[in-house]
Amino acid sequence: MTEKTGSGFGVRGSGKPAENCKTTVEASGAELTVRHLGRQPYEPVWAAMKAFTDNRDESTGDELWLVEHDPVFTQGLAGKPEHLLNPGGIPVVQTDRGGQVTYHGPGQVVAYPLLDLERLGVGVRCLVDRLEQAVIDVLADLSVTGSRQDGAPGVFVNEAKIASIGLKVRRGRTYHGLAFNVDMDLAPFSLINPCGFAGLTMTHVVDQVGEGEWQAMADRLTTAFCTLMGYHPMTGERPDLTEGQTSTARSGHS
């Protein structure tokens, strides 16, 4: 299978659930190893999930990595420099996902699903749908209405974006993932055109319900995703982040 990258910060959204995407993925029922990485810089985690994907085979189990990143802008393969308005001293990392620039920082739940789509028998658009729906279900439990928008993958509350999705598919296996804004400093989003959209308003859980605890939201998201995908979650140890690192970050200063 050829490599695939998304557009925007991920696969282009349709604004509606994917057609022919089963409510629960039937070939699953398998264990999903959930690894909590804590707060980490972006590059070692990127290198580790890429190495995991490159080294896995047909017998390798699927995993979900949950992390809170240090402040960083990540630029996709198709990223245009004009969308970096004034990054200042926040590092900019050129990644191997598709699409434009986004921001990661403390208070944001970042979930990396490392899945074998061919074994699951689903397409990437179905996975995007399930990730979006997991966030929508978490928000619904908080009495907040989340929705999709045409041409923009992710989840919105009214017109403000609360979650972004960006995936890389290599040989039928995925890495990169979902960024869910919980309780974070949203100001850095004003230094870019988020996901390539000028003037896009960003929001977070705290704006909607008055509070938002990172671990609680990470746990809710994991439960919602596993329910939708038919996985049985199992807690795993933190992965080794010391191997395979390369430095691709640069200062935001020109």
Image: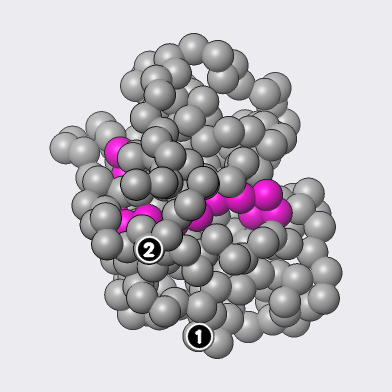
Rendered-image quadrant of the N terminus: top left
Above or below residue 208? Residue 217 is above
Q: Amino acid at mark 2?
A: Leu
Main SS, magenta region, reads loop
The residue positioned farthest toward the bottom in the image shown: 158
Residue on which disc 1 sits = 159
Judge by depth and name the residue closer to the eye, 31 or 162: 162
Identity of the residue drawn at 41% across and 73% down: 17
Q: Is residue 240 above or below residue 15?
A: above
Whether residue 153 appears in this view of the structure is no
Q: Tell me residue 94's x, y (percent).
A: 33, 40
Q: Position of residue 254 (x, y in %)?
A: 34, 47
Q: Hey, which residue is sitting farthest left in the picture? A: 2
Q: Quick one: label 1, few (<14), some, or many (20+) residues within 10 Å? A: some
- The range drawn in magenta is 96-109
Callout 2: SS: loop
Residue under numbered circle 2 = 85
Identify which amino acid the numbered label 1 is placed on.
Glu
**Is residue 29 on the magenta stretch?**
no
Residue drawn 26% across the image and 55% down it: 81
- Tell me where residue 66 sits by quadrant: top right
Q: Is residue 252 above or below residue 86?
A: above
Give the Cα distance between marks 1 and 2.
22 Å
Say left or right for 33 vs 38: left
Expressed as whole percent of the image width and height from the top left, the position of residue 253 reads 41, 46
